[in-house]
Amino acid sequence: MLLGELQNKDVVNVVDGGKLGRISDIDLDSTTGKINSITIKPQTRLANLFSSNNSVVVLWDKIVKIGDEVVIVNFNGYVK
């Protein structure tokens, strides 16, 4: 799967069923090539207007499932 394909999927939190946004970046381990985490950028206009750094970082092991249309994560953190 390509990064562009991941970026087109909505990220949904299994904890509350809420939509977190879309994947904006991936952190790779340069030695192993494995993905450490994904960065999620909310898709709301108001969030982008009032805050320049409202991204959420989710560790790769917190991804529950990557489906055809959504990525499901188990995220218990705080979303700005």
Image (cartoon, rainbow, N blue to C red):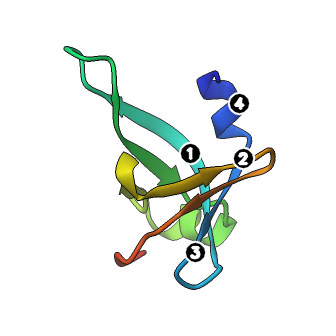
> Alpha-carbon neighbours of circle 4 within 10 Å: few (<14), some, or many (≥20)?
few
Q: Amino acid at mark 1?
A: Ile
Q: CA distance from mark 3 to mark 1?
A: 16 Å
Residue 59: tell me if it is visible.
Answer: no
Please tell me whether mark 4 sits on a helix, a strand or a loop.
Answer: helix
Q: Amino acid at mark 2?
A: Lys
Q: Residue furthest right?
A: 69
Taking depth in this image into account, of 39 and 43 the one nearest to the observer is: 39
Q: Earlier in the sequence, mark 4 or mark 1?
A: 4
Q: Quadrant of the C terminus?
A: bottom left
Q: Earlier in the sequence, mark 3 or mark 1?
A: 3
> Alpha-carbon neighbours of circle 3 within 10 Å: few (<14), some, or many (≥20)?
some
Q: Amino acid at mark 4?
A: Glu
Q: Is residue 27 left or right of residue 9?
A: left
Residue 49: tell me if it is visible.
Answer: yes
Are circles 1 and 2 on residues that touch, CB within 8 Å? yes
Can you tell which quarter of the image residue 28 is in? top left
Q: Residue furthest bottom?
A: 16
Residue located beneath label 3 in the image: 14
Image position, residue 1 (x, y; %): 65, 24
Residue located beneath label 1 in the image: 23
Please tell me whether mark 2 sits on a helix, a strand or a loop.
Answer: loop
Taking depth in this image into account, of 58 and 66 the one nearest to the observer is: 66
Please tell me whether mark 1 sits on a helix, a strand or a loop.
Answer: strand
Can you tell which quarter of the image residue 51 is in? bottom left
At x 43%, y 57%, the residue is: 55
Are circles 2 and 4 on residues that touch, CB within 8 Å? yes
